[in-house]
Structure formats: structure tokens, C-alpha cells
């Protein structure tokens, strides 16, 4: 999947954003805004991964002083990069970050595979066992339903934000705004993300040069269109083989979760709270810089 052409890497709010070529506005990205929300489950998981790494490398740990062990195991996710993981002085510092990135890559790969498959494209090769398990689980689910693609990877804009929705699918005669997720559970942030996409007021699509009403942006032409209609919201959860807390195998699966309108309404309020937190933090940082300049 190519990166959306309207995405900008630096939004000014601590992550990516989008340029609306129709209005000329640069706005915060939905996922960047949601980054302002606390994710205690992810934090605890990251700590668990670091501890597990230290346990698995006890021989290496025993050779170090208390100060070195503290430095080695400290939860500082911003210091390391995957290229540094072979360095025994710092690899455990970011072992949790490496595993998290690995899982994110796995999620991206199966997401791209699903998109290409349902749109009759060219799905990427499946290399890892987990990828094969997830693809097979999705195909099993697909065989049980009548699925038609209405839209895919569409860039949308709402009130001060932009994002790229996954899929709008007609499933067994009902049209759903859907998001593909590979996490162990459906999280509040997933629902908030879905709600933000659903509340968008405009979709922007690439069109041929010369299309009436189209505008040029970085060598391509774009026009606005009404977001395709949908009746309900859903998250399609795809998981590889896993184990529960008691060590029991949970076979790979694909499950569709229909999200209620009440959840979506609450999720949109949660999204707005996250967006306001990001915007407020940026305003505060700018005001602080201005004050410090005046104090010099």
C-alpha cells in the first residue's frame, strides 16, 4: 500500500497530518491526535517485554553492575533504534519497542494483503507463519459472507483533521465503514478512530488532469466528493495463533465486531478530546517559546 499522497510527515502536533488540497489547510491526522490518549495496556505490555528480555538474558545481566542493569532495563523507548539492538549495552533498553515495531509491521502487512485481495490487486507475498495464519483466517471468514467493496483507502477530512479510512464494505447486504485491526482486543481508540472517519464531511480523491473542479497538488490532481454512504460501523479483527494467560492455545481467527451507534457517539467525543489535547499542547508550547524569547 502506497502512503497517501495527501499525508504530511510533520503536522506540527507530534506526528503526521494531511494537506487538504481543496481548502489549502494542513490539519492533524486522526492517528496523531489519538496518540494523546493514554494506553495503559500497551505500556504494561512494553514493560513485560523488557522484563522478559532480561530474564532470557540472565547470564549477560549477571555480568553487569547494578548501575549497568538499571541502565540496561530502564524503560526509555526513545533512545534506541532497531539498528542498535545488536549492541549489548543498549539492546534491552528498547527491546519492547523492537517487538512492538515488529508487531506493527505484521499488522501493516496483513492489512495491505487484505486490501489487495478484496480489490483484486496483487497481495504481497506471505513470508511469516503468522501472516499465513491471518490470511487463511480472513479467507475462511470471507467464504462465510457475501462481501462487496464500496471504497478503500480513501482520504477524508473532518473538522480540523484528516485521515485515511480502511474500507467501506457491503457485507451480507449491509454497508459498513470498517477498519482492519490485528490487536488482541477492540480498544477505545479503535472506536474513536472509526468514529472520526465516519464524521468526516469530505472525501478527496485523485482524478485525471482536466477534471472539472479539480485542483493540482504536488503534480497530481484532486477533487472532493461526498463520502460514500454506509449504514453501520464494524471492526474486522484478524489474529494469528496466540496463547491466553493460562498458556492455552487460541487458534488464528477473523472476527467482525459490529460497533453500536452509542459506542460511535462516545468514541467521537473521545476523539475530539484527544484532538483538543494535541492542539492545546501545541498552543501551550508556542506560547512558552514566545515568552522565553521575550525574556532574553
Image (cartoon, rainbow, N blue to C red):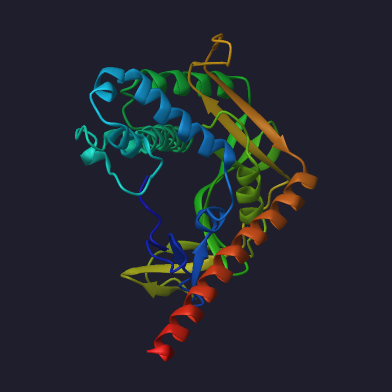
Q: Nearer the viewer, residue 134 or 148?
A: 134
Question: Extreme right residue here?
Answer: 262
Q: Position of residue 290 (x, y in %)?
A: 45, 85
Q: Residue at x 56, y 8 (%)?
A: 248
Q: Residue at x 61, y 41 (%)?
A: 178
Q: Position of residue 169 (x, y in %)?
A: 60, 40
Q: Is residue 127 visible?
A: yes
Q: Position of residue 52 (x, y in %)?
A: 41, 23
Q: Is residue 83 left or right of residue 230?
A: left
Tell me the quadrant of the picture where the N terminus can be found: top left
Q: Is residue 121 visible?
A: no
Q: Is residue 295 above or below residue 221?
A: below
Question: Extreme left residue here?
Answer: 87
Q: Nearer the viewer, residue 252 or 233?
A: 252
Q: Is residue 35 left or right of residue 256?
A: left
Q: Is residue 272 above or below residue 59?
A: below
Amino acid at each position: 500500500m502506497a502512503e497517501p499522497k495527501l499525508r504530511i510527515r510533520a503536522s506540527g502536533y507530534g506526528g503526521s497530518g494531511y494537506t487538504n488540497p481543496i481548502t489549502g489547510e494542513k490539519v492533524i491526522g486522526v492517528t496523531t491526535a489519538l496518540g494523546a490518549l493514554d494506553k495503559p495496556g500497551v505500556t504494561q505490555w512494553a514493560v513485560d517485554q523488557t522484563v522478559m528480555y532480561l530474564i532470557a538474558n540472565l547470564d549477560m545481566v549477571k555480568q553487569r553492575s547494578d548501575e549497568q542493569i538499571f541502565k540496561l532495563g530502564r524503560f526509555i523507548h526513545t533512545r534506541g533504534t532497531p539498528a542498535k539492538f545488536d549492541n549489548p549495552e543498549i539492546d534491552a533498553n528498547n527491546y519492547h519497542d523492537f517487538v512492538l515495531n515488529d508487531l506493527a509491521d505484521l499488522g501493516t502487512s496483513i492489512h495491505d494483503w487484505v486490501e489487495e485481495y478484496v480489490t483484486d490487486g496483487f497481495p504481497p507475498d506471505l513470508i511469516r507463519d503468522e501472516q499465513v495464519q491471518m490470511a487463511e483466517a480472513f479467507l475462511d471468514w470471507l467464504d462465510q459472507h457475501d462481501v462487496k467493496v464500496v471504497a478503500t483507502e480513501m482520504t477524508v477530512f473532518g473538522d480540523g483533521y484528516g485521515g485515511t479510512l480502511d474500507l467501506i464494505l457491503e457485507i451480507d447486504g449491509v454497508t459498513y465503514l470498517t477498519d482492519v485491526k490485528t490487536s488482541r482486543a477492540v480498544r477505545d481508540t479503535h472506536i474513536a478512530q472509526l468514529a472520526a472517519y465516519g464524521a468526516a464531511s469530505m472525501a478527496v480523491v485523485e482524478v485525471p488532469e482536466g477534471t472539472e473542479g479539480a485542483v493540482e497538488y504536488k503534480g497530481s490532481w484532486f477533487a472532493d466528493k461526498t463520502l460514500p454512504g454506509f449504514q453501520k460501523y464494524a471492526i474486522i479483527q484478524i489474529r494469528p495463533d496466540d496463547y491466553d494467560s493460562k498458556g492455552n492455545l487460541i487458534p488464528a481467527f477473523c472476527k467482525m465486531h459490529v460497533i453500536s451507534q452509542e459506542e460511535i457517539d462516545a468514541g467521537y467525543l473521545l476523539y475530539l478530546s484527544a484532538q483538543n489535547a494535541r492542539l492545546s499542547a501545541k498552543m501551550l508550547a508556542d506560547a512558552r517559546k514566545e515568552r522565553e524569547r521575550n525574556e532574553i
